Amino acid sequence: MLVDKTSSRFQLRLLGGFSLRDPEGKAIDVPSKKGRALLAMLATAENGERTRSWLQDHLWSRGSSQDSLRKELSSLRSLLDSFSLDPLPRYVPRDVVRLDLACFDIDARSKTIKPKGEFLEGLDIPYENNFEEWLRETRVYFDSLHPDPAQFSYASPQIVGRISPSRICIGISPINWDTNYVGDSKEVIFNDILDRIARLLMASGGIDLFDHRYNTPAPNVLSTSIEQEPQVLLLPRVAETSSRFVMTLQLMLNETNQVLCTRRNEFDFDKVNRLLEDHELTTPLIAETVDEILFTLYRHSPQLLSMDECGVLRLVNDAISSMFEQSFVGLDRAHASLQTATETLPESVIYAWRAYLSTHQVDDPRIVDFKQIQEEARYYAARAIELDRYNPLVLSLLTHVYAFTLREFDIAADYLQQAKTLCSDHVMIYDADALLNLYLGHLTQSRDSALRAVRLSRFLPFKYVFVTTLCMIDARTGNYESSISAGEKSLRLQPTNSDRPYPPTIRYLAESYARIGDKEKALELIKHLKHAELDFNINHRAIPTLQIEDFLQTAQSTHQLTS
């Protein structure tokens, strides 16, 4: 038997039964199940790197995890270090384990993955629930890369996706022109508006989109068969009055022709050409349209999916609503919904929302080990980027995560810049820009972005978050009257059934009252927040406000802060 000696790397096979061969083609036996799992976890990480605490939590949730991980790494190095390669480098940060991906040919990282069996087929580790959850999610992900071949294709070259029965499918119809004033430029303008709406819908997660404006099948785009028609149609129409274009978008159930919602927008004849030159003019229109479509689909999802199907869009929207309702029950519900969503369809934006949930857990007094929350956020962020590094919503959510949860501002700034480059209209990009520039001290740019976020969040139930960002910025700039106005508005917008007010609102609003001399009001706010939290500390984990700790010391010289 001839052995292929041309390879200069280890051959690691994870799709199907686990297999490892040295650069000479000889099989390497890895007898330990946890050793095989450890290699797989590192091989599927974004840079071949995971933290020690994450690995310990997933493979040794009981017993002496540090010693066990150390011994397993030592055993693997003894198997792999017989060549000049250094596949498990020793000289890395102390809290990290790294697999040098350059030393390996890994089938699961190939750009042309072909199904060869289940991921880590036959491998199970009893009693390690975290590992089993990771394995289940990873298997679902690889399964989703191979949908059934399609017979028909209706798609825009700009829209990429895959079919899933757990998604809601929208079909965009060609524009119905009810006007004699249409030229090439007008067609470009209104089709560009639809393109931007389509991109935002696709980026939101849980939606498949068939764009019937483009009749020529394109490679590597979303396709469908006759048996998988869109459940919902988006019907655009452009008409004209004496001086204006009127663009109407109607969302309709495909099967019954029931109209779910209608949006109407008017554009002056003499100003319509500016829409092509300046995209910012239509940004609020597009953001509001997408918000209305998403909330409409969320409300009608039971009509669109059979009873035994789990709608990803419904789960994601439920998680978003729950995490912003400012209750401990809501946080738990958000966690459960996102977990179910990733099990149903592991998708980049869902992992990004799971990572973003950590920014709310920062202020959850029930969290004892916040380092574990940070490690989970880092893991979910890595999975989100692995699956889609060009989704602007994902990039903006991870900007929040790296800035607020992980405090790695250089990475946050890089993600934000990438999100901006993709020219998205999503409100979270503007809020991420506002907060990151606030943390970095760029207050003018921060306030401009915050005002944009407030405007784009006009119809969102969690608008109070973006108003709070404005409150924080004005407090930092010393404009305390404006900060108080924004802070009080945020309190009025917050859910009435919450366990407590939004903590950042209270911190910055309390300081602003103190700065104008109303210490009684400031202390009342702090006591209100402290009463809702166990062992509350005003600077507990959160980004500190201006000098709030100094303020409290001064205030408490004449007042006692009581529970």
Image (cartoon, rainbow, N blue to C red):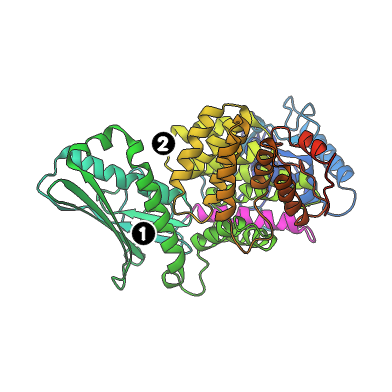
Identified at 35% across, 43% down, the residue is: 158
Asked which quadrant contains residue 532, the reply is bottom right
What is the number of the mark on residue 423? 2
Q: Considering only order in the chain, which callout, 2 or 1, is on the residue closer to the N terminus?
A: 1
Q: Nearer the viewer, mark 1 or mark 2?
A: 2
Q: Is residue 509 above or below residue 257?
A: above
- Please give the residue where the numbered disc 1 appears in the rendered image: 170
Q: Secondary structure at mark 2?
A: loop
Q: Are marks 1 and 2 in contact (CB under 8 Å)?
A: no
Give how far apart the Cα atoms at labels 1 and 2 are. Answer: 23 Å
Asked if the stretch drawn in magenta spans residue 476, the answer is no
Asked which quadrant contains residue 509, the reply is top right
> Identity of the amino acid at label 1?
Ile
Q: Which residues are magenta?
A: 123-146
Asked whether, in this view, residue 549 is left or right of residue 250, the answer is right
Identified at 75% across, 59% down, the residue is: 129
> Identity of the amino acid at label 2?
Cys
Residue 278 at x, y percent in the picture:
31, 33
Residue 386 at x, y percent in the picture:
57, 42
Quarter of the rendering occupied by the N terminus: top right
Q: Secondary structure at mark 1?
A: strand
Asked whether, in this view, residue 23 is left or right of residue 188, the answer is right
Q: Quick one: label 1, few (<14), some, or many (20+) residues within 10 Å?
A: many
Q: Main secondary structure of the magenta part?
A: helix
